[in-house]
Image (cartoon, rainbow, N blue to C red):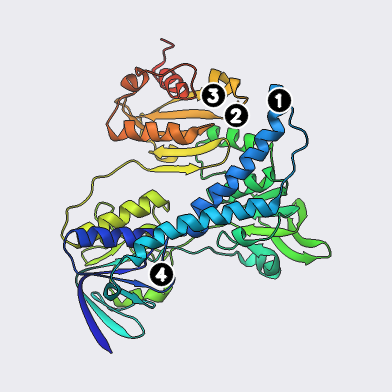
Amino acid sequence: METRQCDVLIIGAGTAGLKAYKAAVARGADTVIVEKGPGGSTCTRVGCMPSKLLIAAARHAHEARRAAEFGVVTGAVTIDAARVWQRVRDERDRFVAAVLNDYHAIPADHVLHGTGRFTGPDTVTTDERTIVARHGIIIATGGHPIIPDALDAVRDRLHTHETIFEIDGLPQRLAVFGAGPLGLELAQAFARLGSEVTVIDSGDTVGGLDDPEANTLALAALRKEMRIELGVDASAQPGDDGACIRWDGGSVTVDLILAATGRPPTLDALNLDATGIARDDHGTPTFDQSTRRCGDSRIFIAGDANAWRPVLHEAARGGRIAGDVAAGGPPAREIPSLAIAFTEPNIVSVGTRFDALPDGARIGSATVEDNGRATADGRSDGIVRLYADGDGLLIGATIVAPEGEHLGHLVALAIDRGTDIATFADQPWYHPTVEELLQSAARDLLGTDA
C-alpha cells in the first residue's frame, strides 16, 4: 500500500473540513483531505438552505391568506407544489455548486477519495493508501440522521432531512417526530403549504427551549398552525389509509412521516480505538473548545462530528480553528453561543442558557404583544427574556419573537463586548421597531421604565 506523508490530514470535505483545509494551507502546511462522498456541505445540500427555501414559499402563502386582515383582498390562495419544489431544488443546487467550487479547487494530489480509518494516533488508511500526518489529523466527518426503532414498520412512508426535499407533491397529512429546531421549521412550512401536520416529541419543550416562560409562549404560537403532542412515546404501524401513529391517549393517521429526532456524529467507520484519545459516554471524542484538540494528542475534531453546537457558523469556525492550530496557529477566543430556529416566531438562544444561570442572576422580560411595531404588523406572539449576572453584565437571552434572528445577533454582540444591562438599555433604539423589545426587557431587568 502506498504511503503519503503530509503536515495536516483532514477527514471530511464538508463545511468544517473545507474551512480547516483553507486555514491549514494559509499557514503553509502540506494538507491532504480525505472524502468518501461528493464533498460539499450538509447545510447547502440537505440542511439549512433547502429548508429556508421551503420556509420562504410557506411564508408567502401564509401572508397571502392573512392579507384580508389588513384590508387587502387576494382571492383564494392555491399552492403549485411542482413550482414550489422546482424553486427549492434549483436554488439549492446553485448553493451546492458554489460550495463544490471550493472543493474542486483543491489540487488533485491533495484530495484522496475513500473512507478514512485510523491505524494509529497519526496514521490513517483508505482503501489504497496510508497517510501519515506530521502535525495533526482533523476529524470533520459530520453527522447523520437517525430513525427511531418505533418507526421501523413504516419506513416506506418515512423521510429524514436528507430525503424530504426530493418528494413529489405535498402530503395531505404529515407527522413530524421531533420538536427541535429542524422538526419545527419543516412542520410549520408544510402546515402553511396546506398539509395537516402533527408534531410528536417525548420531551416537554419545543425548539430546544429551557426557559419555561418562553417555551409556554412558543408552544401557544405554534399550536395555532399545527397539532403538537409533547411528552408522549409514539409508535407507528401500517394502516389501511396510511401510517397509523399511536401513543397513550391519542392517535393520528398520516400519509408521510418526517423523522427529525437527532443527528449524531458520524464516527463509527473511523476506528477511534486505534487513536487512544478520550471519549465521552456516547463515544464522541472530548476536546478543548479553544483549539478543537482532543486531549494532548495531535487529533482535532470540528463541525457536527464533535456534537457541540451543531450549526453552520460553528462548524465553519471550528474548522478554521482546528486547521489553524494543527498547522501551528494559536488558540481561538471564546464567543457567545447563538442558536436560531427559523419558525415564526423565531426561537433564539444566546449565551448562557436559562438552566445554567449562575447564582444571583437576574431576568428581564418584554412581551411581543406590547411592542408597537409587532402589533402594527399583526404579529403579537412571543417574549424576550434577557439574563444578567449579579454584577449586571448581560450574559444570555431567550427570544421568541418576530425578527428574533436579528435580536439574537444584537445580544450576542453585546455579550461579546462585555456590555452591562444599563448600557445595553441606553442605546439608540429606534421607534417603532421590534428591536425595542430588547430595550424593554433591559429596563424590566433594571426595574425602571425610564
**Residue 13 vs residue 130: left or right?**
right
| Residue, disc 1 | 72
- Does residue 232 appear anywhere in the picture? no
**Residue name at image x 44 percent, y 33 percent:** 406
Q: Nearer the viewer, residue 396 or 345?
A: 345
| Residue, disc 3 | 367
**Residue 129 vs residue 324: left or right?**
right
Between label 1 and label 3, give the one nearer the viewer.
Answer: 1
**Residue 213 vs residue 171: left or right?**
left
Q: Looking at the figure, which quarter contains the N terminus?
A: bottom left
Secondary element at tag 2: loop
Q: Amino acid at mark 3?
A: Thr
Between label 1 and label 4, give the one nearer the viewer.
Answer: 1
Within-10-Å neighbours for mark 1: few <14, some 14–19, many 20+: few
Secondary element at tag 4: loop
Q: Nearer the viewer, residue 20 or 417?
A: 20
| Residue, disc 2 | 381
Tell me how far mark 1 sits from mark 2, CA to CA. Answer: 22 Å
Point out the tag, 1 or 2, that comes first from the N-terminus: 1
- Does residue 33 appear anywhere in the picture? yes
Residue 191 horizontal/vertical position (percent): 69, 45
Residue 350 horizontal/vertical position (percent): 41, 38
Residue 213 horizontal/vertical position (percent): 54, 32
Tell me how far mark 4 sits from mark 3, CA to CA. Answer: 43 Å
| Residue, disc 4 | 267
Tell me how far mark 1 sits from mark 3, CA to CA. Answer: 28 Å
Point out the tag, 4 or 3, that comes first from the N-terminus: 4
**Residue name at image x 18 percent, y 62 percent:** 327
Q: Amino acid at mark 2?
A: Asp
